[in-house]
Image (cartoon, grey):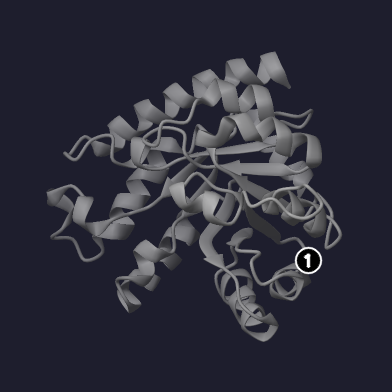
Amino acid sequence: MNRQELFEQIKKKNSYLCVGLDTDIEKLPKHLLSLPDPIFEFNKQIIDSTKEFAVAYKPNIAFYEALGPAGWESLRKTLDYIPKECFTIADAKRGDIGNTSALYARTYFQQMNFDSITVAPYMGEDSVKPFLDFPGKWVILLVHTSNPGSIDFQQIETRDGRFVYEEVIFASQRWTSADRMMYVVGATKADKIGTIRALAPDHFFLVPGVGAQGGDLEAVSKAGMNAECGLLVNASRSIIFASSKEDFAEAARKEAMKLKTEMSQLLHHYS
């Protein structure tokens, strides 16, 4: 999916919602556990109930890898089921030397046909470039995350007076254009989003942390939105685990619709 197609979906749905499929088998409604593939059945119902409002879906790969071959099969079926007009993100946070990155890229872009993958930039350009060798596919680079440990490295000040996360932005803009790269910016760091938007005015940001983690959607949107929206705001637990009972899909729909309604208002106000 290219940039224009993504923006068209945002305009069509009046939404920039990404639903995170962090599907933890230990949190599934108990009535699903007797089914042959409870992970896929859960995801299927979540997708059916939220696809009217979501422009993107982001499976967190760890929840599928942990289940071995059965988990990979659930992931494959989930990816096949996501509507073709929705942007897909492999939240894998890969980052290794070039030949290993090339194999990761082949896994998620050729074997599974995701639109994008999250990538850790710690090992530098040669660990990221292999993901950019696949036309039409996106790298979503970790820049400024919400976890407490982000201060350990991301906010170290360099000799040039910039923070490490700023150096990542400056360096990565030499590797490819805003049509192929997004940045991960945590919603609970809303005070930094405006700073990062000034450094990357044209890039899309993937913003996790709205919902269960307490990020403020309006603050994120005010600081981060650009003329093409420029945001994919992810909510995972607050949507998919809104209920642990048989009404989980309807509860997920209500949470997604609530976020979409607010997003529609913010799009008209800030973009």
Residue at (62, 83) in percent of width and height: 100
Does residue 49 lie above or below 73 as drawn? Answer: above
Residue 241 vs 69, above or below: the answer is: above
Give the residue furthest to the bottom: 99
Secondary element under disc 1, as helix, strand or loop, is loop
Residue sitting farthest toward the front: 159
In percent of the image, x 54 and y 63: which residue is there? 93
Is 248 displayed left or right of 158 in the figure?
A: left
Relative placement, left or right, of 200 versus 150 is right
> In the rendered image, is residue 256 in sight?
yes
Residue type of the residue flagged with mark 1? Pro
Few, some or many C-alpha atoms within 10 Å of disc 1 (few <14, some 14-19, many ≥20)?
A: few
At 53% from the left edge and 60% from the top edge, which residue is drawn?
90
In this orientation, does residue 82 appear?
Answer: no
Between 263 and 253, which is closer to the camera in this rendering?
Answer: 263
Hey, which quadrant is residue 265 in on the image?
Answer: top right
Against 40, residue 146 (above or below) is: above
Quarter in which the C terminus is drawn: top right
| Residue 237 relative to residue 189: left or right | left
Q: Position of residue 196 (x, y in %)?
A: 72, 39
Q: Position of residue 123 (x, y in %)?
A: 66, 72
Q: Residue at x 50, y 25 (%)?
A: 216
Q: Position of residue 27 (x, y in %)?
A: 21, 50
Residue linked to disc 1: 135
For residue 92, side relative to residue 133 (left or right): left
Given residues 219 and 109, the one toward you in this image is 219
- The percent position of residue 98, horizontal first and vertical second, equals 69, 81
Tell me how many marks there are: 1
Which residue occupies the foreground of this view, 49 or 237?
Answer: 237
